[in-house]
Image (spheres, grey):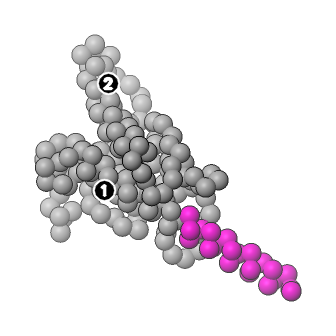
Amino acid sequence: MSRFDQLTDTVETYQALAAENYARVRQLAEELRAGLCDHLGASDGVCVQLVPPQGEFQPKAYGDNAFSVAPRGFRPLGPIAFGIAVRVTRATDWIRVTMQCQKIGEHLILDIQGGESFKLDLPLTGDDSIKLFEYVYQHVLNWFQSRIDQYQQGEYGTREIGFDFSRETDSANA
C-alpha cells in the first residue's frame, strides 16, 4: 500500500466519523428543540427554533445552517456548536442560547454557554430530557430575573456579555 493510499484510507475513516458526529449532534439538537417547546407549553406551539450559534439571527428554522459544521463536504472532527432561540414574549421576541456538543466515550457532552454541562445518551430519555429541558428553561428565566433584581437594587450596569435577542419580522415569516 502506498503512502497516498494509506493517507486517503485514513481520511475516509476520519470523514465517516465526522459524519457520525454531525448526525449525533443534529439528533440531540432536534430532540432538544422539540422537547423544550413541549416543556414550555406555548399555546401556539411556536416557541423554540434551531439557529446559528453566532451572528445575527431570525427566529426561523435554519436547518443545516444552525450548526457550526456543515452536514456535507469535508468536515472537521470535533465539537459542534448550535444555537436555540426561545420565544420570551407572547409577541415576537426571542433569545438565543448557545450550546456546544462533543462526544466523550459513548456519551455526548452538551455545554450550555454561561451555564452547566450535561452528559447525555441518545435518544434522550425520561429523566435526562426533563432535567435538560427544565435547566434550559430555568437558565433563561434566571437571566431575566437576575437583571430585574439588579435593577431593583440599583446595580444593573455591567460589562457582561449576555444572551442575543431577535425580533421576528415579516421577512422571517416568508
Q: Nearer the viewer, residue 22 or 160?
A: 22
Q: What element carries label 1?
A: helix
Amino acid type at image mark 2: Ser
Q: Residue 34 carries which label?
A: 1
Q: Are marks 1 and 2 in contact (CB under 8 Å)?
A: no
Q: Please check the rendered image and state whether residue 18 is part of the magenta-colored stretch, yes or no.
A: yes
Q: Which residue is rendered at x = 28% and y = 26% of the image?
A: 145
Q: What element carries label 2?
A: helix
Image depth: mark 1 or mark 2 in front = 1
What whole-number distance in Å separates the C-alpha atoms at marks 1 and 2?
Answer: 27 Å
For disc 2, the neighbor class at 10 Å (few under 14, some 14 to 19, many from 20) is: few
Does residue 141 lie above or below 13 as drawn? Answer: above
Quadrant for the N terminus, please.
Answer: bottom right
Toward the front, the furthest residue is 126
Q: Nearer the viewer, residue 1 or 172?
A: 1
Residue 151: which quarter of the image? top left
Residue 2 at x, y = what percent?
Answer: 86, 86
The reply to whether residue 2 is visible in this rendering is yes
Which residue is denoted by mark 2 in the rendering? 146
Q: Which mark is residue 101?
A: none
Residue 29 at x, y = what percent?
Answer: 41, 57
Q: Which residue is rendered at x = 51% and y = 40% of the image?
A: 117
Does residue 125 lie above or below 2 as drawn? Answer: above
Q: Please check the rendered image and state whether residue 13 is part of the magenta-colored stretch, yes or no.
A: yes
Residue 5 at x, y = what percent?
Answer: 79, 84
Q: Give the range drawn in magenta.
A: 1-21
Q: Which residue is rendered at x = 43% and y = 53% of the image?
A: 124
